[in-house]
Amino acid sequence: DLRPSEMKPRAPSRPPSKSRNSSVNGRGVSASDFTFGRQLGQGSYSSVMYAKSVSTGEEYAIKVIDKGHLKRKDKTHIAQAERNTLVKLGSGHPGIVRLHSTFQDNWSLYFVLDLARNGELQSRISNLGSLSLPCARYYTAQIVDTLGYIHSKGVLHRDLKPENVLLDDNFRVKICDFGTGKILGDSDRAATFVGTPQYVSPELLERNETTKSSDYWALGCIVYQMISGKFAFHGLSDYLTLEKIKKIDYSFPEGFDEEAKDLVQKFLIRDPAQRLGAGPPGSPNDVRALRSHPFFASINWATLWSDPAPPFE
Ligand code: ATP
């Protein structure tokens, strides 16, 4: 096992100092309460490490964020946004990586998160080329259900992509990375596009605007990708990809399931207000209408989080 002092690549080169605790649950927690293991992933400002609680043996993923790097890049607000949105979302839905506690030492911020042992949805799509229809349907339904909860709490994700859709022990969805998340009504510093261009919505590109509807745009791109194995919008350069998004220039490969096609077409439309799932309750494109779409006819929403996941194929 790696101790925190040995974490790579951006972890402190010294042992953790006496940590300042700012735990979510109010208890004093520090790095010495965990045995750290392998690196599970890496983001722009963080390493995510496997960790086990010394006292309970419970396993977690701990996101270790380099404070110096955040400060140098003027990105402290990203860690704050992630913490605030995760606290707001709490433990109210199985499809979200839950934040158990946070603490810090001189060099790093530590977020103690649910462990999603089966990695990223992206890796499954890459390994298989594309997903079977039952598989794509199941993951789409779990994302729809989770987004419904996230939005009902007044939170936008704003960086939904298959790398941020993680899989737990039972291959169920755990959405992570709320670093560009936003709590509606809060002031906003993150509404400019950074990162992967493939899932960004036309309204963000053209008007710097995001609403919950932009998360459904991203979902449309994800559904397309799960079924076809290709990005909906992809040019030879990021610039050309963004041009395609602005023009909504995409097409379906032959044999793409008709109901899935109809669903994607109802997500990938220019007017955010018209997108399926984004309308106010009672409107023809509200969340209920989305859940009643024929693509989901075989989904039992009541048992979605207890039914076994279909095999990956
Ligand atoms: P980005 O620079 O892409 O915004 P980030 O710094 O916000 O990334 P995350 O996306 O939260 O970091 O995490 C990076 C990677 O670490 C994830 O894509 C995933 O592979 C892994 N990871 C994150 N959280 C967990 C978790 N709870 N369980 C297992 N692996 C995780």
Image: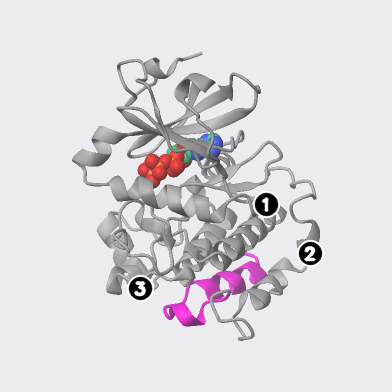
For numbered disc 2, what is the local secondary structure? Answer: loop
Residue at 47%, 56% (x, y): give it: 160
**Residue 167, image x and y in percent?**
61, 42
Q: Quadrant of residue 237?
A: bottom left
- Residue type at tag 1: Ser
Q: Nearer the viewer, mark 1 or mark 3?
A: 3
> Which label number is shown at residue 59?
none
Q: Is mark 2 within 8 Å of ligand 1?
A: no
Which residue is nearer to you in this view: 286 or 77? 77
Q: Which residue is mark 1?
A: 132
| Cα gap from disc 2 to disc 1, whole angstroms | 15 Å
Tell me if residue 268 is in the magenta stretch: yes
The vertical placement of 25 against 2, above or below, is: below
Neighbourhood count class around disc 1 (C-alpha, 10 Å): few under 14, some 14–19, many 20 upward: some
Please give the range of residues in magenta: 255-276
Q: Of the two numbered discs 2 and 1 on the same chain, state the one appearing first in sequence.
A: 1
Amino acid type, mark 3: Glu
Residue lying farthest bottom? 283
Disc on the earlier residue, 2 or 3:
3
Q: Which residue is mark 2?
A: 298
Does residue 206 appear to the left or right of 161 in the view shown? left
Kindly state the secondary structure of the residue where label 3 is placed: helix
Q: Where is mark 3, residue-wise?
A: 203
- What is the crowding at mark 3: few (fewer than 14 residues within 10 Å), some, or many (at least 20)? some
